[in-house]
Amino acid sequence: MDHILVIDDDADINAMLCELLAGEGYAPTGAYSGTEALLALAGDTFALVLLDLMLPGLAGDQVLAKVRATSTVPVIVLTARTDKPTTVELLKLGADDFIGKPFDTAELLARVEAQLRRARTTQAGQTLTHRDLVVDLDRFDAFIDGQAAGLTKREFDILSLLMSHPAKVFTRANLYETLWGAAYLMDDNTINVHISNLRAKLAKLRPGTEFVETVWGIGFRMAPVRP
């Protein structure tokens, strides 16, 4: 039974979400502030987090940043603000998905199941290997000769997807829509930023070796071994 943390300071909404999730066979726990949520996360293991942005004291975006500093648990943000700058910033902070308030309960449940299914798929394997680069799916990081790259969750997700299909060229839209679960906007620079950071971390482990290749005008793939 998947344990889900529901973080919302509105007692009625929190209770409604917990009841909705329990009715679908999940095990929900309610938290009503950012501080309470972090205490719950420190003391228990959750399969997914539903996070409201408007929280007393420690705001939702601050909670998200603190969660991402130590955990890769899937986080779906609940927000009344769905403007592009807000949603892009949430995704950059490490949100896996977001849904606008007021929300449709059927859509919310579908998004919850999608994130849980993706997490189970990621955890089902153990390692992916490309040349001397190893991605450990249990430790959520990449290694060369035992040295860890120190990837963020998004960097890890991008690298894992590329290494799952090393010969395939992924467009920016492919990566964004697969990993963020949202429509890609042509002027969004999010993928480029994550790819750049990912390359920099891999370069520290193996200077002079390109692991992620840009296919100009199309997208990205794992760099093939060339004679």
Image (cartoon, rainbow, N blue to C red):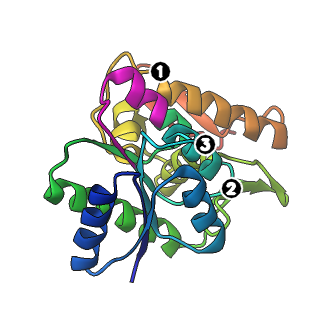
Is residue 53 shown above or below 111?
Answer: above
84 inside magenta stretch: yes
**Label 1 environment density (alpha carbons within 10 Å; few <14, some 14–19, many ≥20):** few
Looking at the rendered structure, the number of numbered marks drawn on it comes to 3
Cβ atoms under marks 1 and 3 closer than 8 Å: no
Secondary structure category for the residue under label 1? loop
Secondary structure category for the residue under label 3? helix
On screen, residue 62 versus residue 199, left or right, reads left
Is residue 174 shown above or below 74?
Answer: above
For label 3, the residue is 65
- Tell me if I can see residue 37 in this picture: yes
Name the disc covering residue 189, or none: 1
Q: Quadrant of residue 27?
A: bottom left
Q: Nearer the viewer, residue 159 or 155?
A: 155
Q: Quadrant of residue 208?
A: top right
Name the disc covering residue 155, or none: none
Which residue type carries mark 3? Ala
In what quadrant of the picture does the C terminus appear?
A: top right
Which residue type carries mark 2? Thr
x, y percentage for residue 90?
46, 35
x, y percentage for residue 164?
49, 57
Residue in the image at 78% along x and 35% along y = 203
For label 2, the residue is 70
Kindly report which numbered mark, 2 or 1, lies closer to the viewer in this rendering.
2
x, y percentage for residue 106?
14, 59
On screen, residue 113 versus residue 219, left or right, reads left
Separation (CA) of disc 3 from disc 2: 9 Å
Separation (CA) of disc 1 from disc 3: 20 Å
Which residue type carries mark 1? Asn
**Label 3 environment density (alpha carbons within 10 Å; few <14, some 14–19, many ≥20):** some
Tell me which segment is drawn in magenta. 77-90
